[in-house]
Image (tube, rainbow, N blue to C red):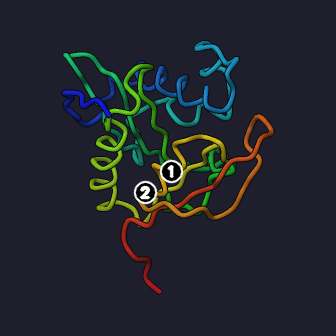
């Protein structure tokens, strides 16, 4: 792994355009043919960024050399937005994370996620995500403590792992 000098800062309202770009890169893990302009026109994706900064949004942006190069964010989906394969309950936000090409494999994703989860633990008991079962990121998520709840069919018809990370024990 080649280390990279980076700073991680909270995502701001003005980061919405960058989050759209990151959502494009995240969605390419499911559908290689997707184009940047398709992301904002895909109802299953719009819910993760549109109107960034509302209650239930929490995210961080990684910068290197003064340039945004990655982001990890959580959104608590409400109403009709909850109709996702990753949905667990009304108190568990969904994770989105991506890096610009060329920044993978340098520990930046782990840094972003660690920062995000440390802050998220003050707000939610757990975090959910889906990831294609053949995506190498599955190992990263498992290393961070995510557990697979079930295998689901994703929006493009392939298998994804629905995973959950307990941020602190649920009251029983």
Circles 1 and 2: CB distance less than 8 Å? yes
Figure check: 25 above or below 120:
above
Residue placed at 63% from the left, 52% from the top? Answer: 86
Q: Nearer the viewer, residue 5 or 30?
A: 5
Secondary structure at numbered mark 1: helix
The x, y position of residue 18, in whole percent, is 40, 21
Figure quadrant of residue 61: top left
The local crowd at label 2, few if under 14, some if 14 to 19, many if 20 or more residues have their Cα within 10 Å, is few
Residue placed at 26% from the left, 16% from the top? Answer: 67
Quadrant containing the N terminus in the rendered view? top left
Q: In this image, 163 relative to 65: left or right? A: right
The local crowd at label 1, few if under 14, some if 14 to 19, many if 20 or more residues have their Cα within 10 Å, is few
Q: In this image, 106 relative to 3: left or right? A: right
Figure quadrant of residue 64: top left
Residue 143 — which label?
2
Furthest residue to the right? Answer: 157
Instruction: Quickly name the residue at label 1.
Output: 139
């Amino acid at each position: 792994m080649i280390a990279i000098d980076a700073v991680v800062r909270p995502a701001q309202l003005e980061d919405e355009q960058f989050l759209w770009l990151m959502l494009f890169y995240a969605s390419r893990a499911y559908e290689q043919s997707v184009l940047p302009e398709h992301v904002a026109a895909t109802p299953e994706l719009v819910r993760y960024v549109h109107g960034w900064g509302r209650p239930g949004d929490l995210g961080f942006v990684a910068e290197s050399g003064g340039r945004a190069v990655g982001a990890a964010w959580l959104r608590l989906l409400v109403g009709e937005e909850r109709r996702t394969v990753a949905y667990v309950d009304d108190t568990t936000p969904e994770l989105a994370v991506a890096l610009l090409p060329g920044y993978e494999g340098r520990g930046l994703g782990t840094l972003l996620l660690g920062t995000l989860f440390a802050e998220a633990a003050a707000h939610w008991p757990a975090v959910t995500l889906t990831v294609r079962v053949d995506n190498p990121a599955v190992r990263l998520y498992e290393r961070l403590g995510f557990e697979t709840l079930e295998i689901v069919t994703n929006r493009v018809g392939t298998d994804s792992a629905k995973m959950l990370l307990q941020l602190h024990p649920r009251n029983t």
